[in-house]
Amino acid sequence: MARRRVDFTDLMRLSSGALVGHPLRSALSMLGIAIGVAAVIMLTSLGEGTRKYMVSQFSEFGTNVLSIQPGKRKTSGVPNAFRGTQQKLTIDDAEALGRVPMFETVTPSALGQARVEGGGRGRSVFVHGVTADFPDVMKFTVRQGSFIPPGDPRRGGSVAVLGPQLKRELFGDANALGEFVRIAGSRLRVIGVMEPKGQVLGMDIDDAAYIPVATAMRIFNLEELQEINVVFRHEGQTEEAIEVVREILIDRHRGEEDFTIISQTEMLAVFGRVMDVVTFGVAVIAAISLLVGSIGIFTMMWISVGERVSEIGLMRAVGATARQIQIVFLTEAILLTMMGGLSGLLVGLVATVAIRIGIPGFPAGAPIEYVAAALGVSAVAGLLSGVGPARRAAELEPVEALRTE
């Protein structure tokens, strides 16, 4: 008997026939693949969005900034919460660093939360004790008036600069310059209003007040600074700048390194390591989902072969070869996988759009290489899961298969 070649049309008709004939079983079989692909799309969208968001937040301050905090942080924990400090971080330390030529700007900082009252209203906000160079370090801009004037940081002053949100809450649309506010009982004159900046690392910069650092230390009864920020020329000097800061402060603190130096580069590196762990977690979840999906397709295909023995026998009787039978069932497995993968892709993309709509400004979006990898791996998993049932179908003897009719 002459062998007839199975063309593409026959292949699609034979392979899709079983899928269309059992829609529920087919849908359940491809569910695992769909969940795996959707999980990869959604989790990588969240991870990539988080990475972009954090990088943009750190970039707000530039990558040539060092943050020096009291207390030595070797692994984790809050500085000064349990271990304490051998010597406090002081304005004198900041001034000593400010005399180093390679440092463009050095700003001491003290922070507290207090009720700010003005214009007959009041609200509790963060109050930043800083110096005149603070806007240059943080890349802030003054919209009205001026910032804290330069001078001896130990002398303080009875002036305040308001964030735009705080100004609006206290004085509405009226001009706040020259007005007085009370912060923790101290009367300060408003000399400036900042440009809107929004939230940075979860802190609302617009809803805050800025006062001289010495005034803040007096109001909040602080004996030490909470932070010193150092700006150097460019990112390539990071290691050198860290060594210079370390050498100067250790010398001033009687040989003790009782402070922590944090660079933007280091923070990004730490965040990168966290994202690596998240990516590994995504891979594990996807692998488990794809494994479950592959088992589902294998089971479905195996059952399908058992149910279609007579059909296979008939196909062999009319001239189909064992290889052609094998191709038909392999194609069926691939179709199942492709449908599952495309369904997962659709669900993942819809979820990504929903995240973008639900969290405006969050740059959620799966990298194209992850999408391609998820679809590729799912296709391979589906193909492998169809090999066993396809070989079983191909090895059936035509006569024995026809006898089952």
Image (cartoon, rainbow, N blue to C red):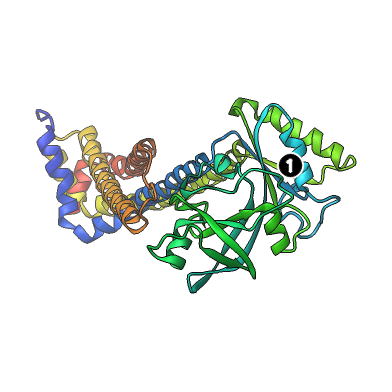
* SS for dot 1: helix
The x, y position of residue 136, in whole percent, is 55, 39
Q: Amino acid at mark 1?
A: Ala
The x, y position of residue 189, in whole percent, is 57, 60
Q: Residue at x 19, y 52 (%)?
A: 19
Q: Residue furthest right?
A: 254
Q: Would you say 271 lies left or right of 195 here?
A: right
Count every numbered label the image shows and give the total. Answer: 1
Q: Quadrant of residue 126?
A: bottom right
Q: Residue at x 22, y 46 (%)?
A: 400
Q: Residue furthest bottom?
A: 120
The x, y position of residue 330, in whole percent, is 26, 40
Q: Quadrant of residue 324?
A: top left
Q: Would you say 222 lies left or right of 266 here?
A: right
Image height check: is 233 above or below 219?
A: above
The residue at which mark 1 appears reads as: 94
Quarter of the picture holding the C terminus = bottom left
Image height check: is 324 above or below 192?
A: above
